Amino acid sequence: MSGKNLSRPFSRRSLLAGMIASACARKRGTRYQGWLFVASGEKEVAVADLASFRRMTTIPLPCAPDQLFQSRGSVFAICRDARTIVEIDVDQFRFAGKIALPGKPVAVRLLPDDNAIVLTDEPGALLRVDLASRRVTGRLMLPDAPADLDLNGALAAITVPGKNAVLRVSVPALQLSGATDVGVPCDAVRFRRDGRTIFAGAGMARQIVAVDAASGSFLTRLPLPVSPSRFCFNADGGQMFVTGTGADALAIVSPFQNEVAETILAGRTPHAMAVSARRNLLFVTNLESGDLTILDIDTRGLAASVHVGETPGDILLTPDDEYALVLDQHSGNVSVVRITTVLDRKVKTKPLFTVFPTAADARSAIIVPFKS
């Protein structure tokens, strides 16, 4: 790929100089001052400048990254096949170090002290990782291969599909608080905003199961028209949006009432989601049609629809809430949607603001603001 012939890392100053030299000729709105990091299926992370919407460089890594996250001003990537977490120096755009893991990482969550807990399989375990010293400092072995992890305060929830179980783990001591047999294999898991209820998605059963976080008691099953795979909450946590395969529909769950409030159409094959808290909008990518569907959360109505490419995956909203960035899973192209423009009822054909390349086989992306 084009960024692999770098002999030395780019400095932030040289990248900013290149940004200014290549400024777009069209009249520009306010741009977000930050970088977009994109994990590729290759052993690299692409970096794009969101102030100019262009790819700037590629950072070679010792292993293929699967998921990116931020801590202590650095970007980290979990590399599943290599059983490794790698650290990226954001200032110099270079590989900075790695942490060897005793299993294949599945998911990661940050702790308040900037340590992390990492879920692994082969073998199944929950690890505490000191990111600063690059050491694994604690380990809890699990009864079988886990699927997903969520964290609320001092309690972690883990799904173990092979045991039809939702585990509760006390994080400070890495001790198992209990295991709930929910009767069906579950994958995705999330806490309710107040931490009192755990929701787990049972894909084969087309259900969401609810478990009391304190006692582990089974609460209820919520039947769905889709196989739930992705959860997303509105700003106050009072609505949970659920997408999955099986129908061109999106389920809206009332988490405090433990009920499915409504099922609505959200384009063809609703997939990834993101919420704009300021605008109270839900953004949904549509895998089959290549569209981005934007819904008004209050009215449940269609606010706009934009064609964004062939295989749209994850959505990132810039922190200033001005742009939606849709990452194509295969090509790595990023479709940029200027939110104000697509919401303008006077604009009949909803245009993309621009499209720029990052890295093929894009797996994960994060936005990092420029340092002042």
Image: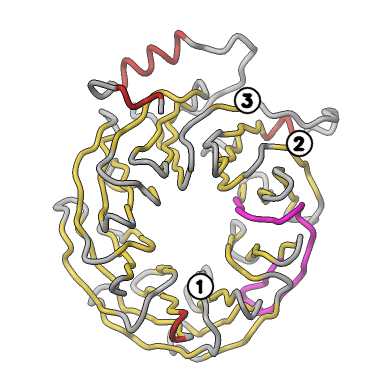
What is the secondary structure assignment of the residue under circle 3? strand
Q: Which residue is mark 2?
A: 343
Q: CA distance from mark 1 to mark 3?
A: 36 Å
Query: Is residue 256 or residue 106 the one in the foreground?
Result: 106
Tell me if mark 2 has few (under 14), some (14-19) or many (20+) residues whose alpha carbon lies within 10 angstroms of its own. some
Q: Which residue is rendered at x = 71% and y = 75% of the image? A: 224
With respect to residue 349, does 144 lie above or below?
Answer: below
The numbered mark, 1 or 3, whose residue comes first in the sequence reads: 1
Q: Earlier in the sequence, mark 2 or mark 1?
A: 1
Residue at the image position 67 percent from the left and 50 percent from the top: 287
Sequence order check, earlier mark of 3 and 2: 2
Q: Where, by quadrant of the figure, is residue 258 drawn?
A: bottom right
Prevailing secondary structure class for the magenta stretch in the rendered image: strand
Question: Which element carries disc 2, helix, strand or loop?
Answer: helix
Q: Are marks 3 and 2 in contact (CB under 8 Å)?
A: no
Percent from the top left, x then y, of residue 138? 19, 70
Q: Is residue 339 left or right of residue 214?
A: right
* Span of residues in magenta: 251-274
Amino acid carrying mark 2 in the image: Leu
Dot 1 lies on which element? loop
What residue did someone put label 1 on? 187
Q: Residue at x 71, y 56 (%)?
A: 269
Q: Contact, CB < 8 Å: mark 1 with mark 3?
A: no
Q: Quadrant of the N terminus?
A: top left
Kindly identify the amino acid type of the residue bearing the numbered disc 3. Answer: Thr
Q: Which residue is denoted by mark 3 in the rendering?
A: 354
Foreground tag (2 vs 1): 1
Q: Is residue 70 above or below residue 355?
A: below
